[in-house]
Amino acid sequence: MKPLFELICVCVVSVGVTYADGATLLTFDDLSPSSDHIIIPNGYGSLQWNNFSVLNGLNRPSNEGYWTGTVSPSNVAFNSFGDPAFIRSSSSFDLNSAYLTAAFADGMRIQVQGFVGTTLAYDNTYTVNTNAPTLINFNYLGVDLVRFISSPSSQFVADNLMVTIPEPTTFGLLSMGTVLGALGALRKNVNRRDRA
């Protein structure tokens, strides 16, 4: 029974590393690309993902931005087919920072637009290369959609994406309290059985 308790505890833990200020570091290393790559699932990091995939950058040639853009071992995100990609949430979030790298095209420009509803609140363009990741401090606050558009239309690599998701609602806290209470009761039952 003890392994079951540990398994349940692991399922409750959220994705990424969460800091005291509420920021979450998404490294993509907890995703498991199969032979080549996988689409980032909706809900990863409490966000909705469109046209973003993940692969193991260290399995790529060392002259590609997938390899040089790997900041945390070993997975990186990228825009599939070089097409525009976006992240969104049903509530507002902050896009704090990320490491961006061009996968193939030096001098790539990445336009990053942050929206609040239908209003364009942020619109900046960043130039990246294939030889090293560039840390971009976005500081896009209170957005609900961020769109990434590469020029030329080619893949870019993203790693260590830092976002801040708002505090959980009262209902969410109550739900988490219920789950933790149930886990505590389960643990007591397991401990009693182990002693018997």
Image (cartoon, grey):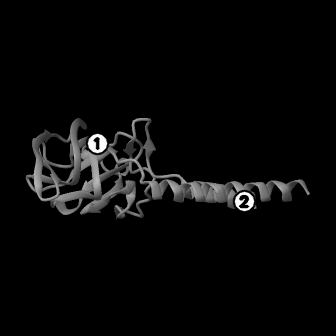
Toward which corner of the image does residue 101 lie, by quadrant?
A: top left
Residue 106 vs residue 113, the one in the foreground = 113
Q: Is residue 88 above or below residue 114?
A: below
* Residue at screen point 17% across, 53% down: 116
Q: Are marks 2 and 1 in contact (CB under 8 Å)?
A: no
To which residue does mark 2 refer?
Answer: 186
The percent coordinates of residue 58 (x first, y second) are 37, 47
To which residue does mark 1 refer?
Answer: 69
Identify the secondary structure beneath mark 1.
loop
Please report whichever mark, 2 or 1, sits nearer to the chain's N-terminal start.
Answer: 1
Q: Is residue 35 visible in this depiction of the protein?
A: yes
- Quarter occupied by the N terminus: bottom right
Label 2 crowd bin: few (<14), some (14–19), many (20+), radius 10 Å: some
Identify the secondary structure beneath mark 2.
helix
Counting every numbered tag in the picture gives: 2
Q: Is residue 131 visible in this depiction of the protein?
A: no
Identify which amino acid the numbered label 2 is placed on. Leu
Farthest front residue in view:
170
Identify which amino acid the numbered label 1 is placed on. Gly
- Asked if residue 133 lies left or right of residue 181, the reply is left
* Residue at screen point 27% across, 52% down: 92
Q: Is residue 100 above or below residue 89?
A: above
The percent coordinates of residue 102 (x first, y second) are 19, 46
